[in-house]
Image: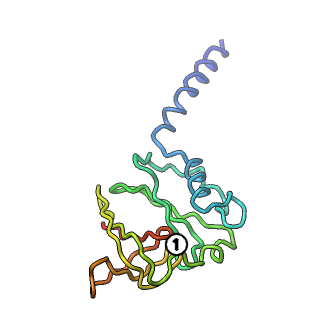
Amino acid sequence: MRLIPAAILAGALGTAVPALAAGFHDLASIDREVARFTGAPQGTEGGARLPVDRRLKLTQCPMPLALEWYGSANSTVLVRCPVAGGWRLFVPVAAGQAAARAEPVIARGEAVSIAVQGSGFTVSRQGEALEGGAVGEWIRVRPAGEKRNTIRARVIQPGRVGVELP
């Protein structure tokens, strides 16, 4: 008689756990995204120091995650769910990454694509970098055709800078 209630309980738990987990974001996918972003596996120089804490219960993000370098030394990756009221998470990077990422990927005078991103839209325009910078750094840029107007934009990748509007 005791086997039947245990079997029912085990069956009920087996179906309840995936249903409960379905409402939360897959933390292993965050680890994979951080590894792809940094270009280094977790636990190695340049990769995340540790996996994301498995005790976290983050709501499922309906959009692709937004990753960017955080801080002046690029020693942390900021992972965000880019929706209104979305969550954000800071992932520390193992030593050595700051020196590797500090190299400028945009040089002064280089032609760049300037992307302005807001809630539900992205507008791109060509421009010129007035300063050099590494990924994650803020630099001054001048939109093409403008003589005096300059803006500050974050370096996203070689040849591309961006500004995110609230």
Most distant residue in the top direction: 1
User: Is 84 on the left-hand or right-hand side of 103?
Assistant: left
How many marks do you count on the picture?
1
Q: Residue at 60% of width from left, 54% of height from top?
A: 53
| Nearer to us in this view, 145 or 137 | 145
Q: Is residue 148 left or right of residue 96?
A: left
- The amino acid at mark 1 is Val
Q: Where is residue 77 in the image (x, y as percent from the top left)?
A: 55, 65
Considering only vertical position in the picture, is 55 above or below 164? Answer: above
Q: Position of residue 24 (x, y in %)?
A: 48, 44
Q: In which quarter of the image is residue 91?
A: bottom right
Residue 1: percent from left, percent from top = 65, 11
Which residue is depicted at the point 48% across and 50% down? Answer: 58
Q: Which residue appears at 62% of the width and 57% of the height?
A: 35
Which residue: 32% across, 83% down?
A: 150
Secondary element at image label 1:
loop
Residue that label 1 marks: 135
Which one is nearer the viewer's eye here, 128 or 70?
128
